[in-house]
Image: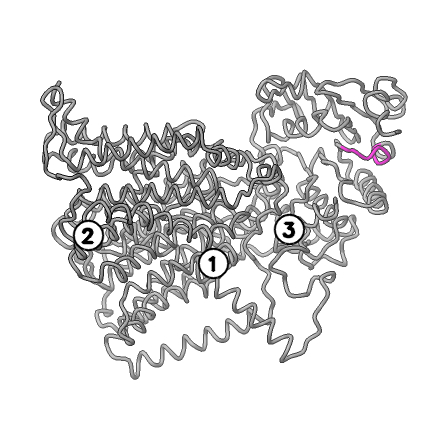
């Protein structure tokens, strides 16, 4: 019995932290419709502020914690709301999620660069309890340490304050009203903006509290990875609460922590199960909850009675680019490609050839995002995992079956495609942000569990991957990669032009209308998923051949890169093949440029992370919209073509959508 | 045996009975109207027929097959065509592309490997059929324009055309006149009549516009508070006292 209680207590502090972040997730989702993936990063930022103040500047714990939790964290929340999310009210939930994804990628790097300092130690932060190591005895001979007490007591206090706020304070009542319907609330004279700002501050405070409380449990703050992983556990809890109920979020968090504690206690230490089940539990829980928890799907649908008054969310600009623009971008793209190619064989040294090759390989991987996001309209966060399946698959098939590498690459891509289809079948039921979260859960299980297994990534030893015969040197290998990129590019263009692409276009134009003519949405999207996963697998295999070894430590296959891949492609342009190639080359060239100017590598993540925030405004990508703008400028001022009227349809496509037929319906009815 | 037989459709929302035991028939080639005041349950009934909502009780039999539980796209393949009250077109596609996509779905010849081998371009018979529908609806002049450039009235014709390409046995029109002015409405009614004559498609029409229904439908069902209060020949229904009270009365004021 005493063991049982002890194990429960072991998991309780973590459960409290899960609950705090989950409450923040539910709160912001309910009041502003944003599923804020950046809370993990915010928790990390608060922990870093606390650390810097306490350890480096010698502040006592309490003022340092108060500043980090009560001043810094709400301020960050307020800034995010004012600068970003307030302007995204009418954006799709997916666009909001992409913005928070960008923050998740950018914020930890900002913290490391500008707060902690690259490579500086972050060891040994202590908790806010007056005596961290104090041991408190309870019934059944169980004990809690000072830092455990800090977590539990703070969580209880925070939840009590929140409950009182909802029950008695006017702002609490308003928050509850905004949850029901922001517009209705505004009609009755309440400033929904102010309420939303307040709830962002409040939920960010909870994230900051979680960060400061959990920091002492980590040996070092590091780069924030541990905090992001905590966040994922909190996502599972938020799903358990159906994104609605704060008490359920509290309960779910504690439950998850306690189950983890029990697993850790009862599973024989060192056994396979203990090694893999415990770390995988939150992700597995997330995955299972997403698939089987009833009521989650209905929670997604907007219940706002006035939701219909908003203009419908614009679909990403599909085929509406002018002929001139297509020709101009193609000519420019091919020109740049040829110049690069010639340079590669004349003046470039080995280093630059390597950079260029990597850029080409990333372009191949990014074309998978062109398929799933640009054509399929889904945000998959598992593309790096599919690349990993391609890479590890190639390595293992070559080793186990002694096959030559070229057919192996295709087999590995096929394997990734099959896994993609299998992942798509259950997650497509969810749709929207939950589909993305499902893919994230898969990517996490892949990075934290599968990659650790010997038969996947070789365990302690790196796996050797041969290059195809005659391509051992870097120059011919570059040619080979370019050839693969060209083939895959044409493949993507053909599929987009073909029936599959048309069906997907129809589905993203209007899913109900597409179904009304007999298009099976699930089938089309499963095809898109499988194709996309196969392309990612192909790119991952190329990457493995480029490195000639892969191991569990290959970063490009980790879920963090999966997030980053989506962010970078979506920022530039997920709609076009050039977008993917631009993204691939940017990913390798921007760090070189930064390096040239003596700037740190992490800035790449920050640039693209913050860039992703623009996704809501330019769903077609920054590059695409800038190109369009400069094309319009050229037409207007240089060629002086007459601006065509909207009626004959040859005019430049408007980006505000006011004259689109589907939108005009409401206008004309008024 | 009627083409469409909906029997005893009952739908409740959180205790409120939106539809109570509603049954209708539509025969092949016939134009039937479904009318009723606001909130009578017309759209709910429509959505139950189309599979967007699942009724608590009742059955829908179409062309001799029970489709009560069939998915939306399956119903489309069995011969349901529809238009939307709030226009639902595919952004970024031209008028012709709308029709060609629907034609490809009907034929079911789209394959990923054909895309990859560049064999997915519209075939000559596909083009011919889409040209035929364009001519029927008078959309030839805008065939290669993106749908964003169209007026609302012609946008609705594109919806009709897209539905016709699937060779529906029954066309379900959800308030086709909504958002159109009287001239456009008249033109639409004329075109629909022509379509019905040329293709022999049955039509079930949910409509607010009394004039439009009176001139177009040969038979009517009247819904009020979720129950059928009258049905029959259009002229007879408009004479019906209960209908006048429930529905027309408020229009005459």
Q: Which of the chains bears the disc numbered 3? A: B
Q: Say if A588 sits above or below A51 in the image.
A: below
Which quadrant of the figure contains the C terminus of chain B? top right
- Decide if residue A105 is on the left or right side of residue B211: left
Rounded to the nearest angstrom, the CA distance separating label 1 from label 2 is 38 Å
Query: The residue tagged with tag 2: helix, strand or loop?
Result: loop
Residue A246 in the image, given as x and y percentages of width and height: 39, 31
Q: Residues within 10 Å of mark 3 (few under 14, many from 20)?
A: many
- Decide if residue A314 is on the left or right side of residue B162: left
Colouring mode (rainbow / by chain / secondary structure / one colour): one colour
Residue, disc 1: A614
Discs 2, 3 touching: Cβ within 8 Å: no
Name the mark nearer the viewer: 1 or 3. 1
Query: The residue tagged with tag 1: helix, strand or loop?
Result: helix
Is B133 part of what is drawn in magenta? no
Q: Quadrant of residue A643?
A: bottom right
Relative depth, front residue between A225 and B125: A225
Span colored in magenta: B207-213
Name the mark nearer the viewer: 2 or 3. 2
Residue, disc 2: A59
Residue B233 in the image, given as x and y percentages of width and height: 86, 23
């Amino acid at each position: 019995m005493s063991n049982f209680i002890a194990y429960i207590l072991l998991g309780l502090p973590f459960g409290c932290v899960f609950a705090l972040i989950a409450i923040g997730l539910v709160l912001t989702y309910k009041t502003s419709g944003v599923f804020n993936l950046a809370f993990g990063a915010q928790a990390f930022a608060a922990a870093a502020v606390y650390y810097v103040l306490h350890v480096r500047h010698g502040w006592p714990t309490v003022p340092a914690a108060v500043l980090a939790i009560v001043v810094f964290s709400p301020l960050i929340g307020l800034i995010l709301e004012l600068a970003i999310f307030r302007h995204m009210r009418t954006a799709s939930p997916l666009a909001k999620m992409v913005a928070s994804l960008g923050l998740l990628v950018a914020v930890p790097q900002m913290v490391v660069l500008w707060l902690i300092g690259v490579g500086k130690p972050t060891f040994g932060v202590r908790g806010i309890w007056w005596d961290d190591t104090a041991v408190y005895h309870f019934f059944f001979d169980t004990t809690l340490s000072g830092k455990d007490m800090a977590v539990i007591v703070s969580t209880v206090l925070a939840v009590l304050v929140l409950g009182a706020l909802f029950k008695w304070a006017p702002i609490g009542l308003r928050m509850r009203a905004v949850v029901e319907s922001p517009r209705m609330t505004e009609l009755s004279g309440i400033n929904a903006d102010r309420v939303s700002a307040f709830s962002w501050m409040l939920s960010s405070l909870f994230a900051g509290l979680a960060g400061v409380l959990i920091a002492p449990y980590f040996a070092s703050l590091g780069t924030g990875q541990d905090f992001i992983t905590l966040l994922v556990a909190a996502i599972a809890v938020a799903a358990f609460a159906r994104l609605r109920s704060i008490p359920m979020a509290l309960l779910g968090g504690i439950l998850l922590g306690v189950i983890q504690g029990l697993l850790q206690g009862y599973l024989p230490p060192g056994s396979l199960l203990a090694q893999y089940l415990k770390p995988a539990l939150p992700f597995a829980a997330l995955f299972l909850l997403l698939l089987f928890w009833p009521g989650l799907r209905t929670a997604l649908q907007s219940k706002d009675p006035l939701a219909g008054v908003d203009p419908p969310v614009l679909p990403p600009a599909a085929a509406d680019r002018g002929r001139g623009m297509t020709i101009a971008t193609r000519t420019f793209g091919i020109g740049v490609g040829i110049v690069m190619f010639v340079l590669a064989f004349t003046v470039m040294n080995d280093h630059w050839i390597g950079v260029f090759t990597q850029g080409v390989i990333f372009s191949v991987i990014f074309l998978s995002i062109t398929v799933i996001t640009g054509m399929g309209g889904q945000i998959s966060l598992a593309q790096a995992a599919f690349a990993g399946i391609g890479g590890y698959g190639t390595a293992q098939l070559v080793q186990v079956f002694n096959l030559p590498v070229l057919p192996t690459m295709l087999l590995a891509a096929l394997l990734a495609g099959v896994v993609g289809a299998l992942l798509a079948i259950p997650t497509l039921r969810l749709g929207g942000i939950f589909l993305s979260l499902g893919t994230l859960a898969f990517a996490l299980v892949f990075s934290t569990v599968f990659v650790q297994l010997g038969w996947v990534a070789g365990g302690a030893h790196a796996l050797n991957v041969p290059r195809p015969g005659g391509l051992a040197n870097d120059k011919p290998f570059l040619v080979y990669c370019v050839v693969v990129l060209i083939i895959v590019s044409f493949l993507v263009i053909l599929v987009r032009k073909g029936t599959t692409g048309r069906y997907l276009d129809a589905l993203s134009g209007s899913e109900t209308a597409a179904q009304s003519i007999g298009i099976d949405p699930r089938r089309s999207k499963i095809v898109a998923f499988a194709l996309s996963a196969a392309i990612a697998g192909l790119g991952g295999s190329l990457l493995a051949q480029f490195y000639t070894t892969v191991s569990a430590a290959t970063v490009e296959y980790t879920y963090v890169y999966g997030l980053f891949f989506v962010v970078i492609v979506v920022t530039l342009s997920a709609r076009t093949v050039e977008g993917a190639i631009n993204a691939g080359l940017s990913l390798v060239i921007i760090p070189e440029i930064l390096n040239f100017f003596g700037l740190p590598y992490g800035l790449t993540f920050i640039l693209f992370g913050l860039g992703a925030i623009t996704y809501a405004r330019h769903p077609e990508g920054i590059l695409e919209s800038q190109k369009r703008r400069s094309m319009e400028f050229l037409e207007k001022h240089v060629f002086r073509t007459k601006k065509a009227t909207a009626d004959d349809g040859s005019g430049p496509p408007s980006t505000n959508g006011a004259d689109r037929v589907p939108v005009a319906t409401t206008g004309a009815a008024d | 045996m009627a083409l469409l037989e909906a029997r005893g459709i009952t739908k409740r929302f959180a205790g409120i009975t939106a539809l109570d035991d509603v049954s209708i028939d539509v025969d092949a080639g016939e134009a039937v109207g479904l009318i009723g005041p606001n909130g009578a349950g017309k759209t709910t009934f429509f959505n139950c027929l189309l599979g967007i909502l699942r009724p608590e009780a009742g059955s829908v039999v179409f062309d001799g097959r029970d489709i009560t539980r069939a998915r939306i796209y399956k119903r489309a393949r069995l011969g349901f065509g529809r238009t939307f009250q709030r226009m639902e077109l595919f952004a970024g596609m031209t008028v012709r592309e709308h029709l060609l996509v629907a034609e490809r779905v009907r034929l079911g010849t789209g394959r990923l490997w054909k895309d990859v081998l560049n064999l997915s371009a519209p075939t000559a018979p596909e083009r011919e059929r889409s040209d035929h529908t364009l001519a029927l609806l008078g959309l030839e002049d805008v065939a290669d324009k993106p749908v964003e450039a169209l007026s609302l009235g012609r946008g609705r014709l594109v919806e009709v055309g897209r539905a016709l390409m699937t060779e529906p046995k029954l066309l379900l029109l959800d308030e086709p006149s909504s958002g159109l002015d009287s001239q456009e409405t008249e033109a639409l009614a004329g075109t629909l009549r022509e379509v019905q004559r040329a293709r022999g498609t049955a039509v079930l029409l949910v409509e607010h516009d009394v004039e439009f229904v009176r001139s177009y439908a040969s038979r009517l069902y009247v819904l009020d508070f979720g129950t059928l209060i009258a049905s029959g020949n259009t002229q007879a229904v408009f004479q019906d006292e209960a209908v006048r009270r429930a529905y027309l009365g408020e229009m005459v004021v």
